[in-house]
Amino acid sequence: MGLVGYRLSLDGVILRCSVCGAAYEPDPWLFFCPRCGGVFDVVLEEPRVTRGFRGRGVWRYSELIPVKTQPVTMNEGGTPLIPVPRLAEESGVGAELYVKYEGANPTGSFKDRGMTVAVSLARALGVRRAAAASTGNTAASAAAYTARAGIGLTLVLPAGKVAKGKLGQSILHGARILEVEGGFDEALSVVVESVKRYGYYPLNSFNAWRLEGQKTIAFEVYEEIGVPDYVIVPVGNGGNISAIWKGFKELLEAGLIDKLPRMIGVQAAGAAPLADAFLQGLDHPLFKDHPETRATAIRIGKPINWAKAMRAVRESGGVFVKVSDEEIMKAQRMLARLEGIGAEPAGAAGAAALARLAAQGLLEKGERAVIVVTGHALKDPEAMMEAPTETLHAGSVEEAVKLLGLH
Ligand code: F0G
């Protein structure tokens, strides 16, 4: 019970280790399996049969979200599903394509879906101080939601590696920032240690309750177009792809759907521990010490949710794909210039994989695919400015008018 007495119930679920399968009571302070150190899935003990969803956004699906408390919410979720026929044609893809535009969330990324659940839980637990490591979007989202909840937040960020928009949001919302030399993987290990030693409440995706909010991407897609043949997701830590897969499986268990999509995980070539393992037919990730990519949001070498993400792809009959930074930047421009959709580089990774997937015989005519665009273009202003453009300059009105006449 929190200081101001928010009710909380976590009934009807168990925590199951994603690595060894051991099951535990739903202790909200248990994040790692005491047996093997793996992260958990929150598993519903029985399929939930819904009486019909009500309201909008993430909490429209509250019957399927096991955290029962007063939510800390900004009406996150309910993002647009946008047909992208020009992108499909230009990428040589026969399938009907849609973009699920997660940039339309309150802080500009899909993280808000998870943060509303994790921060609601934290507030109900009476948490005073939370922490998160981040490549930037988790930071921005955690900063906004903890501000709303009146919870103190410390962000552990890889020094010099967070895009300007995200850093600005973290500062604006009043988080305390600890920059650490190294990458995201080092920053995350600092947070894990801070949870164990000092009792900070973690808002990273190893907190499985957060992923319970992110699974609502699946519910929204289902309500709008049914079950697509493919869902294409940029992968860093592997939390989001596993959350979306979990969402579809819960719809199946509830008897609302009778088939499942194939999950396509996309990684940047310089930060592809899961795609590399997949391409070599391995069951274990090939962790990477110095990941590097222009898509800084997914610059991750040791994804903490590796077991869940690999299972999502394997169980669904999907694939992992690697894309180069050039392909990512090109896809960002295609989304922007063919479809009007502004994505940050990592958010465009799914679109960057289209041509490669088509070359593998996937995304055929008669099929449907949803590309999850995970973050807004405004997150990374420098990346936007790298796009080729024609800027004219005139010293006077007269000269400006003359220049227009020449074009
Ligand atoms: N796309 C964007 C824009 C992201 O910010 C992230 C993750 C991902 C994709 C990958 O999602 O980790 O669930 O596989 N960003 C984290 C952060 C790591 O700190 O903001 P994932």
Image: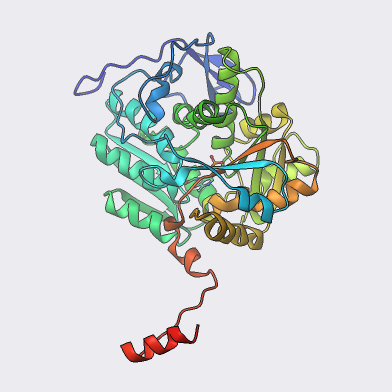
For this view, does 280 lie left or right of residue 76? right
Nearest the viewer among 262 and 169 is 262
**What colour scheme has been applied to the protein in the rendered image?**
rainbow
Q: Is residue 45 left or right of residue 258?
A: left
Q: Residue at x 67, y 29 (%)?
A: 311
- Quadrant location of the N terminus in the rendered image: top left
Q: Is residue 392 above or below residue 43?
A: below
> Is residue 286 among the parts visible in the rendering?
no
Where is residue 67 shown, x and y percent of the image? 39, 20
Q: Nearer the viewer, residue 62 or 66?
A: 62
Q: Position of residue 327 (x, y in %)?
A: 66, 59
Q: Residue furthest front?
A: 405
Specify the farthest residue to the left: 4
Report whether 233 appears left or right of 182.
Answer: right
Residue at 35% across / 25% down in the picture? 121
Give residue 3's quadrant in the image: top left
Count of numbered circles in the view: 0
Q: Residue at x 30, y 38 (%)?
A: 146
Q: Is residue 88 visible?
A: yes
Whether 182 is drawn above or below 152: the answer is below
In this view, 144 is above or below 344:
above
Q: Camera-side residue: 172 or 363?
A: 363
Q: Percent from the top left, x then y, of residue 72? A: 30, 31
Comparing 200 with 256, the one in front is 256
* x and y percentages locating residue 46 in the rendered image: 53, 8
